[in-house]
Image (cartoon, rainbow, N blue to C red):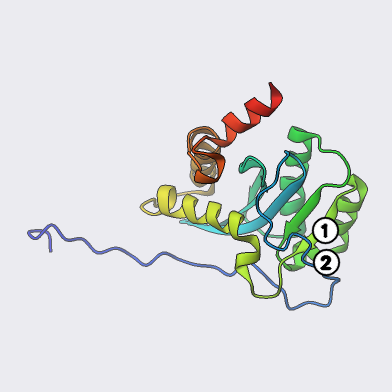
Amino acid sequence: MREAGVEARQRRRWRHTTDSEHSLPVAPNLLNRQFMVAEPNRVWVADITAIWTLEGWLYLAAVLDLHDRQLVGWAMADHMRTQLILDALEMAVGRRQPERGLLHHSDRGSQYASHEYRGTLARHGFQASMSRKGNCWDNAVMERFFGSLKSEWLADQRYASHQAARRDVIEYIEMEYNSCRLHSTLAYQTPREIELAVAA
């Protein structure tokens, strides 16, 4: 294999992050795949993904603004309890200071359906929306972000620790995805360019 220039590639590890088999209240799908949003801080989408390291799984919770496709909040931890997604949401709120009435869309996972998370959304005056059961296309923009992260940045990485993975993921979010990645839905501008144009 060495002489032929061929090397074995391990199959990427995968972990299920959505537990929709619960009895918690589920919000209706108010977003209904309306992914084009005219103004910032009107519609946010959220989800969780898992990243394998030699220390075990690292979980990334993220919040994305559909207007400029920017990651506005995120959190990482070695668990995917409700506190993880609360940390990502509070980061997004702190950075963007949205007005009441924002639509928050997620899957039906138990973390997003939890009393604590729903209470936090209500306290901020946000309206909850959830994907239909087993339908990843209802949150396609966030799924696309996770796909880009894993195919463009993580595919050939082997992280020795959570700290190394966390540092690399933040670099992708801030220096690559938010600042440099061109989006066809943004007329081939970056999320940061759209944000700055609105602020101007």
Q: Which residue is mark 1?
A: 128
Q: Nearer the viewer, residue 37 or 98?
A: 37
Q: Which residue is mark 2?
A: 27
- Crowding at dot 1, Cα within 10 Å, few <14 / some 14-19 / many 20+, comes out as many
Tell me the element at label 1. Answer: strand
**Residue 106 drawn at (x, y percent):** 72, 60
**Residue 166 drawn at (x, y percent):** 54, 44
Tell me the element at label 2. Answer: loop
Vertical comparison of 33 with 67: above or below:
below
Identity of the residue drawn at 78% across and 77% down: 22
Q: Are marks 2 and 1 in contact (CB under 8 Å)?
A: yes
The mark that comes first in sequence, 2 or 1, is 2
Q: Nearer the viewer, residue 10 or 23?
A: 23
Please tell me the numbered disc located at residue 180: none
Vertical comparison of 197 with 117: above or below:
above
Q: Which residue lies most toward the left here? A: 3
As shown in the figure, which amino acid type bears the numbered disc 1? Ala
Q: Nearer the viewer, residue 110 or 78?
A: 110
**Residue 73 drawn at (x, y percent):** 68, 42
**Cα separation between marks 2 and 1:** 6 Å
Viewport quadrant of the N terminus: bottom left
Identity of the residue drawn at 75% across and 64% down: 130
- Crowding at dot 2, Cα within 10 Å, few <14 / some 14-19 / many 20+, comes out as some
Q: Quadrant of residue 109?
A: bottom right
Identity of the residue drawn at 91% across and 52% down: 122
As shown in the figure, which amino acid type bears the numbered disc 2? Ala
**Residue 74 drawn at (x, y percent):** 66, 45
Residue 100 in view in this figure: yes
Identity of the residue drawn at 69% across and 53% down: 45
Count the numbered circles shown: 2
Q: Nearer the viewer, residue 168 or 163?
A: 168
Q: Quadrant of residue 93?
A: top right
